[in-house]
Structure formats: structure tokens, C-alpha cells
Image (cartoon, helix red, strand yellow):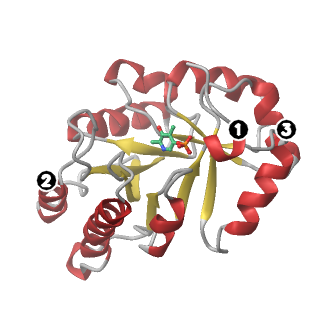
Amino acid sequence: MTMNISDNIREVRAEIPSGVELVAVSKFHPSEVVMEAYSAGQRCFGESRVQELLEKEKELPRDIKWHFIGHLQTNKVKQLIGKTSLIESVDSERLLRLIDKESGKAGVVTNVLMQVHVAKEETKFGFYPEELLQFFTDRGFETLTNTHICGIMGMASNTDDLIRVREDFRNIADVFNRIANDSTLGLRGFDKLSMGMSGDWQIAVEEGANIVRIGTRIFGERQY
Ligand SMILES: *Cc1c(COP(=O)(O)O)cnc(C)c1O
């Protein structure tokens, strides 16, 4: 792989259909590297750790849109509020309520996606499809005052079996569509479906993703 980040950004942007938003996942890469992508025109970046996002947010240009994509611990919510354009990884109702409460205190509205768990790995976070559908049927979103639920995020199983991967994306998209198309819910602006990473984003887009989160393909391997 070429390690020219500007070229990588331009290549990936050229491959992704218009109407699909690219989140350049910059986790574990230093700010200078993010700046290279920024110089190539990229404005939306994804981070999975609160501290790392806050540090980069402080030193990088103001017009960057930061997406938080990792498991968010409740004790870090307060620090993150006001720093993101989208928290993609709301994986429990407790976390959602806390984001809402802290956003209220800070006087901001926080945009979030609900994370759905369909992959077979035990370690993945998120709502099971039935759980999330139940949350919406119970109208759990109605009591939110400072949080806007914009859609759903999900990951496919970590496998080479592309049939499985497609099945997982289809299941995530199905949950999304059932909620988005339920007019009795009266949701507004529930229209974002974030699925797909470096290895599987094409399949995700075929299954309906309108946000893709791509790290390795742009920045190379991460050093953990
Ligand atoms: C790290 C990460 C990505 C990017 O993965 P790549 O394989 O490097 O493209 C996407 N989504 C989430 C939730 C991640 O944690």
C-alpha cells in the first residue's frame, strides 16, 4: 500500500459513491497524520478513545467534524460532550440517558447513533436488534431533551466469510429500515446508517450504508 495519505484519501473518496459520508478513522495515528488527510480535503474523522479525541480536537482545525466510534465509558461522557459532531456508538440506554443529561447541563444538543449488535463475537458492544426495536416501540426517545438520535451504527462479524458479512449488514439495515419507515414513531432526521470499514465497506454500501468508517485503508496499520 502506498503510504501517501493524500493519495489514499483521494482514492477512497473516488471509490465511495456520492451521498455516502467518509469517516476517516484516525485512532492511534498522530495529529500530523490527521493534518495530511485534512490538507487533502478530509473534514470528518473518527476516534475511539476519549482522551485521544480531546487532544486532537484541541490542536487541530476547528472545522473538523469528530465522530466518536468506540465504547464510551459513562465516567468519560461529560468530557466528550460538546466536542463531537456525532457519537456513533451509543450501546446502552444508560449511556444514552447520561449523554442527554450532560448535554442538558452543557446547553448543547448531541447527535448520536444507536449501535446495533449482530456480529457473533461475544465482545462486541451494542443493542440486540429486538432490544433496540423495543426501545423505539416503547418510545424511549420521547423523554430525551438534548439528544438527537440520527440513526444506527453497526459492525459485521470479523470473518473472511463475505456471505456472513453481507448477512450481518443486511440485518443491521433491516433494523434501521424498520425504525426509519415506522411513521407512527414520528421520528425526524433518523436517516444515518453507519456500516463498513476498510475490508468490507463496499458490501456495506451495497446493503444501504450512508456512512463508512475507514481507517487502515487510508492511514495504514495502527501501532497499538
Ligand atoms: C477502528 C474502527 C474502524 C476502522 O477500521 P479499519 O479496518 O481500520 O478501517 C471502523 N469502525 C470502528 C467502530 C472502529 O473501531
Q: Secondary structure at mark 1?
A: helix
From this view, report whether residue 198 is shown above or below residue 55.
below
- Estimate how packed mark 2 is, as few (under 14), some (14 to 19) or many (20 or more) residues with alpha carbons within 10 Å: some
In the image, residue 170 lies at what x, y percent?
31, 69
Q: Residue furthest front?
A: 160
- The residue identified by callout 3 is 36
Q: Secondary structure at mark 2?
A: helix
Q: CA distance from mark 2 to mark 3?
A: 41 Å
The residue located at (28%, 38%) in the rendering is 124
- Amino acid at dot 2: Glu
- The residue identified by callout 2 is 131
* Sooner in the amino-acid sequence: mark 1 or mark 3: 3
The answer to whether residue 52 is left or right of residue 155 is right
- Between 137 and 21, the one nearer to me in the picture: 21
In which quarter of the view is residue 177 placed? bottom left
In the image, residue 200 lies at what x, y percent?
49, 57
**Tag 2–tag 1 contact (CB < 8 Å):** no
* Sooner in the amino-acid sequence: mark 2 or mark 3: 3
Q: CA distance from mark 2 to mark 1?
A: 35 Å
- The residue identified by callout 1 is 219
- Total residue callouts: 3
| Beta carbon of the mark 3 residue lies under 8 A of ligand 1 | no
- Amino acid at dot 1: Phe
Q: Nearer the viewer, mark 2 or mark 1?
A: 1
- Estimate how packed mark 3 is, as few (under 14), some (14 to 19) or many (20 or more) residues with alpha carbons within 10 Å: some
Q: Nearer the viewer, mark 2 or mark 3?
A: 3
